[in-house]
Amino acid sequence: MIEATGLSRAFSEHDAVRGLDLQVEPGEIYGFLGPNGAGKSTTVRMLCTLLAPTGGRATVAGFDVATEPDQVRLRIGAALQEASLDPKQTGRELLHLQGRLYGLSRRDAATRVAELTTLVDIGDALDRAIGTYSGGMARRLDLAAALVHNPTVLFLDEPTTGLDPMSRAKVWEEVRRLNEQLGMTVFLTTQYLEEADALADRVGIIDGGSLVAEGTPDALKRSVGQDLIIIHTDSGPEAAVRALGSIEGVTSVESVDDEILVSTADGAVTIGPVAIALGKHDIAVRDLTLRTTTLDDVFLELTGSRIQNDEPTPTEEVLV
Amino acid sequence: MTAATVPHTGGAITARPAGAVQDVVAIAGRALRAVPKDLESVVPPVLIAVFFFLVNIGTLKGLTEGAAAGFDYTAFQMATAILLGVTGVSRAPALVIDVQDGYLDRLLMTPVRRGAILVGHLTADVAIAAALTVPIIALGLILGVDFATGPLGILVFIAMSALWSLAFAGFGYAIALKTGNPAAVQSSFLLFFPFLFLTSSYVPRDQLTGWLDTVAGLNPVTYILDGLRALTLSGWDWSAIGGGFLAIGIVASISMSLCFAALRGRVAQT
C-alpha cells in the first residue's frame, strides 16, 4: 500500500531523509518511531504529496507521489503534527468543506459529517467555532477531517502529541477501530514508545533520516534483550537465588543491592513459576515486578541514545 | 486527473475529482462565511469612506461648485469615496493565517485545483467589494446624487468598483503567498496612498498642476475615477468608461501575474 525506495529529501545542506526503504502492507498499522528531528514528518509530507522527494521514489495506493499526486490525494487522509484547522469555522463547516473538496455531493458530504460526528465523538461542539475547542477535540476533528472521504490510507503525524492521557486513549481507540472495522492502512509517526507499542503491527525506527530497524514491536524488543523480574524480599537473598536458579526459562538470577534480578526470555510466562517457587520456599516477598524490554531499549541499543520525550518509560507491574 | 472513484471497503461515499466550479464555489463560500466573523476587515473601510465622503463634501462643495456652474461635487466625490471603501479590502490576511496555521496544507492535501484556492478567494473579494459599495451609493443617492446612466449605470458603477478592488487585491495575495507574513500583507496598504491620492481624488484633473498632473496622468486610478464619474455625471461616455475598465485591466494583469506566480511558488512542494 505504501512503498518507498531510496526516498530522500535534502534541504540546502541538510539531509532530512536519507535513502528510506519502506513497504507497508494493506490493512497494516505501521508505526514510524523516532525522536524529534529524525525525519518522520518530512517523510509523511513527502508521502502526502506536500513535499517533493529529492531522491528515490515512493508510491501510495499504487500511485507515484511525485508524478501522480492528484491520484494519491484522492486516496489518502492525513492529520499532520499540528491540527490543521481554521479556528473561525465551525466543525461542521470544516468537515462539509472537506467533503466538497473531495468531490462529494452536498448530500453525501452531509451524510459523512453525520457519520463522523459519531465516530470521533465531537457531539454538540460540531456547531461551535473550532477556536473554542480543547486540544483533544481539535485533534479528533482533525482526524475526522482526514476521514471525510473514506481514504484508503490514513497518515497520522504524531496524532497525540500534547494531548492529556484521556484524549490520547480516545485517539488510540479510534485508530484501532478504523483499522479493524474499515481495514484502513494507517501510517503513524510518533515519538511515544508506548503509542507505537500499543498500536502498530510493525514499527520502523528512524534516526538521523535513516531507518535503523524494522519489525513487530515484540520482535524488536526480543532482538535486543530479555525481560527482567525484580524481587524485593524481607528474607536474605541467598535463599531466593537458590530457589529460582533451576526454574525453566530463567536465564540468570543475581542479587544486586537489595534486589534480586531474574533474567528471562519471556517474563510473562516465567513470572508465575517464580512466584510459586518463592512461596514454596517460604520466602517473604515484599514486591515482585516484571519489567519488559521497551522500544526505548531497542532505540538505545541501535543508536546509543534514548528517545527524548516527557513520557514515562512504560513498564508492566505485577504485584504479588 | 482521471475521473476515477476511489474504491474502499469502508463506505460507499468516496473521493472523486470535483469540477473546477465546485472547487471555486467551495473556497469562495468558505471565504464569504468568514466575513460576518471578521467584520473588522470590512466595516472600517466603509466607515472611513463615508467619513471622508461627508467631510470632503462639507469642505469643498461650496468652493468647487461656486467655481464651476452646474458642477455636482457630491457625485464627483462619491467615486473617490467608493474607491476609498473598496481598495485593499480582501481575504489575503485570512490566507496568511491559513498558511501559518497549516490549514493551507490541509487544503493542499485535497485534490482541489491549486488555482481554485486563489480564484475562490478572489471571487469572494469581488462579492464583498460589490456589497461594500451599496451603503456608499445609498448615501450618495440620499445626498442627491443622480446617475446620468440610470439603474444600469449603477450596476456598471458597482462592477467597475468591485473589479478595481479585485485588481488591487492581487498585490495583497502576492505578498501573502510569497511571504506568509501578516505584517508584510499589511504593508501592501502603502500602495493605497499613491494610487488614491496622486490623482484627481479631490478636484478635477484640469485643476491639477505641475508634477501632480503628470503623475495623475500615469496613475490608472485617474482613469477609473473618470469612468465612475462619467456614469454619474455625464452618461454613457464610452471613452471614459472604457478607459476605466482598461486601466483596471492593466493593473489586474500585473497583480494577477504576481499573485498566481506566488501561488505556484507556495504549492511547488519545495
Image: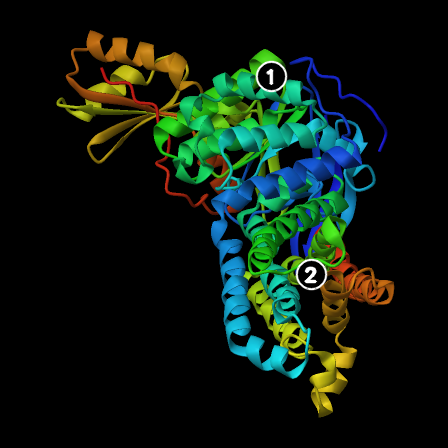
Choose between A111 and B198: the one closer to the eye: B198
Is any atom of residue A258 visible in this view? yes
Can you tell which quarter of the image residue A275 is in?
Answer: top left
Residue at x 74%, y 43% (from the top left corner):
B116
Outermost residue to the left: A234
Q: Identify the image quadrant of the N terminus of chain B.
A: top right
Q: Where is residue A28? Give x, y as percent.
A: 63, 21
Instruction: Name the mark on residue B220.
Output: none
Answer yes or no: do the residues labelled 2 and 1 have beta carbons within 8 Å? no
Secondary element at tag 1: helix
Disc assigned to residue A111: 1
Q: In this view, does A71 lie to the left or right of A229?
A: right
User: Dividing the picture into quarters, in which one does residue A40 lie?
Assistant: top right
Task: Report if residue A59 is visible in the image.
Answer: no
Q: Where is residue B86 in the image (x, y as percent from the top left)?
A: 62, 59
Is A292 in front, or is B113?
Answer: B113
Is A201 rendered above or below residue A247?
A: below
User: Mark 2 packing: few (<14 Cα in 10 Å), some, or many (20+)?
Assistant: many
How many dots with numbers? 2
Kindly identify the amino acid type of the residue bearing the numbered disc 2: Ala
Residue furthest out toward the bottom: B210
| Residue drawn at x 69%, y 13% as measured from the top left | B12
User: What SS does tag 2 mark?
Assistant: helix
> As displayed, is residue A220 above or below residue B8?
below
Residue A79 on image: x %, y %: 57, 35
Query: Type of residue at label 1?
Result: Thr
Q: Nearer the viewer, residue A15 or B152?
A: B152
* Label 2 sits on residue: B174
Please tell me which residue is depicted at 58% across the width and 18% down the height of the picture. Answer: A179
Q: In this view, does B155 lie above or below A227?
A: below
Q: Mark 2 lies on which chain?
A: B
Residue density around tag 1, few if under 14, some if 14–19, many if 20 or more, within 10 Å: some
